[in-house]
Amino acid sequence: MNYSAQLLDELAAQYALGTLRHAARMRFERLCSARSDALAARQRWEDRLLPLDLAVRPANPSADVWLKIQRRVGITARPRNARRFHVQWWQGALAASLLLAVLVTAKLTIWNAPSWQPVAVLAQANQAPLWKLERSADSREIQIRTLGVVSLPATQSYELWVLPTGEGHPVSLGLLPRTGAVGRALTRAQQNLLLAATKVAVSIEPLGGSPTGLPTGPVVIVAVISRTA
């Protein structure tokens, strides 16, 4: 299939929003593993939506909202005892379902959680660390954790690069988060470069990342990759 830049951007947006489901989602993940432009589009959308994800907080619905939900699903007024039994049964069933979901999720998280290994701590000269870069034991993923206060105008982004040994251009590993943590899957080429490299760098780019695929702004951090990575 011919994937244009526009199609890749649309698929990446659907993937990041969670509207790309099942087989289509798996196909796009395989495409990201095979094509750097697909992975870059996915990373751009994940970075764009990261602030919204961090801003989401659970809310408890009011009694009026619960009443509307009950009416919507067909729960009508009943004799007090019958209604109390029905509500208790319904709440018990809901609690059991939630508990089962938590247990399943916990097991899946424990079974599938990657073992993270340190790669580098990113800090400007004589400044406190801003990010910690780690990779999974199989080198297929990286994780970037924010350690300090990241100050940057809203029209700019920090972008992470792996610096190949010998000849070759820097290769982007995506944008750095302003808060929280973000994980990314790497292409095979990115995996090999990161394993062979001795340094990573951070540059200041326009919002959304470098438009050329290479650093265009000032390089503000160069960090040595940990020998234990």
Image (cartoon, rainbow, N blue to C red):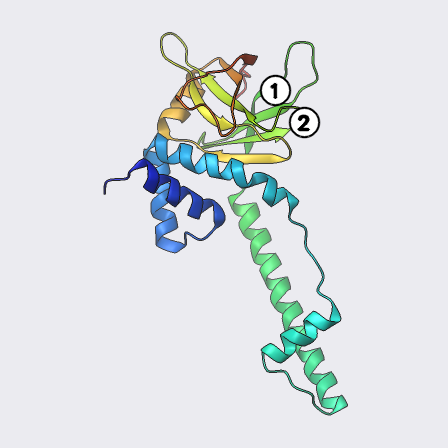
The percent position of residue 70, horizontal first and vertical second, equals 64, 77
Residue 125: image x %, image y %? 65, 9
Q: Secondary structure at mark 2?
A: loop
Residue in the image at 29% along x and 38% along y: 4
Q: Which residue is mark 1?
A: 121
Mark linked to residue 147? 2
In this picture, is 205 found above or below 79?
above
* Residue 222 seen in the current view: no
Does residue 121 appear left or right of residue 77 in this picture?
left
Residue placed at 53% from the left, 46% from the top? 111
Query: Would you identify the image quadrant in which residue 101 lies?
Result: bottom right
Crowding near the residue tagged with mark 2, few <14, some 14–19, many ≥20 C-alpha atoms within 10 Å: some
On residue 188, which mark appears?
none
Left or right placement of residue 52 versus residue 112 in this view: right
Q: Nearer the viewer, residue 70 or 163?
A: 70
Which residue is located at x 35 percent, y 51 percent?
Answer: 24
